[in-house]
Image (cartoon, rainbow, N blue to C red):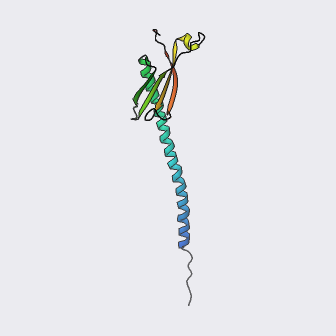
Amino acid sequence: MKIDTNEAGVSLLETLAAITILGIIMITFMSVFSQAALFSSRAETELTAVHAAEIVLSDVRNEAPQENDSTREVTTGEGHDFTAEVRLEETPEESDSREAQLGLQRLHILIYEDDTTGAPLYDTYTFVEEESGS
């Protein structure tokens, strides 16, 4: 009697090895994609915070800042809510100060995601004209 030894098919062991290798490759790619999604989300939040700072700056330039420190809520067109802290900093008293000569006052804008207790997402400095009564 002759035994038929057909070795043209795929064995169970080869199939399991292929599935294991494919699983390892998929896990690697999935971790890369999840990290990319987290990075993209963080970058979007930071760019929206920059936009919020521009909104605050526009508001401050339209209304002469009178308070030394003020906090305001900012909602951007993207639907993000931020807290902005506006600090009007003292102008140096030296007569040779370029800021004093030009009649400018330094303004520091800090943008926070929730409240002003943590680290700011974004901060920037700019100058506004001093009020003539100062």
Q: How many marks?
A: 0
Q: Is residue 19 above or below residue 28?
A: below
Q: Residue furthest bottom?
A: 1
Q: Residue at x 44, y 25 (%)?
A: 56
> At which x and y percent is residue 5?
57, 81
Q: Residue at x 44, y 28 (%)?
A: 84
> At which x and y percent is residue 127?
51, 18
> At which x and y percent is residue 76?
40, 31
Q: Residue at x 46, y 11 (%)?
A: 131
Looking at the picture, tell me which residue is in the foreground, 104 or 16. Answer: 104
> At which x and y percent is residue 85?
45, 27
Looking at the picture, tell me which residue is in the foreground, 74 or 93. Answer: 93
Q: Residue at x 52, y 11 (%)?
A: 103
Q: Is residue 20 above or below residue 33?
A: below
Looking at the picture, tell me which residue is in the foreground, 69 or 40. Answer: 69
Looking at the picture, tell me which residue is in the foreground, 119 or 24. Answer: 119
Please indicate, yes or no, whether residue 10 appears anywhere in the rendered image. Answer: no
Q: Is residue 84 above or below residue 104?
A: below
Residue 9's image quarter?
bottom right
Please indicate, yes or no, whether residue 43 appears anywhere in the rendered image. Answer: yes
Q: Quadrant of the N terminus?
A: bottom right
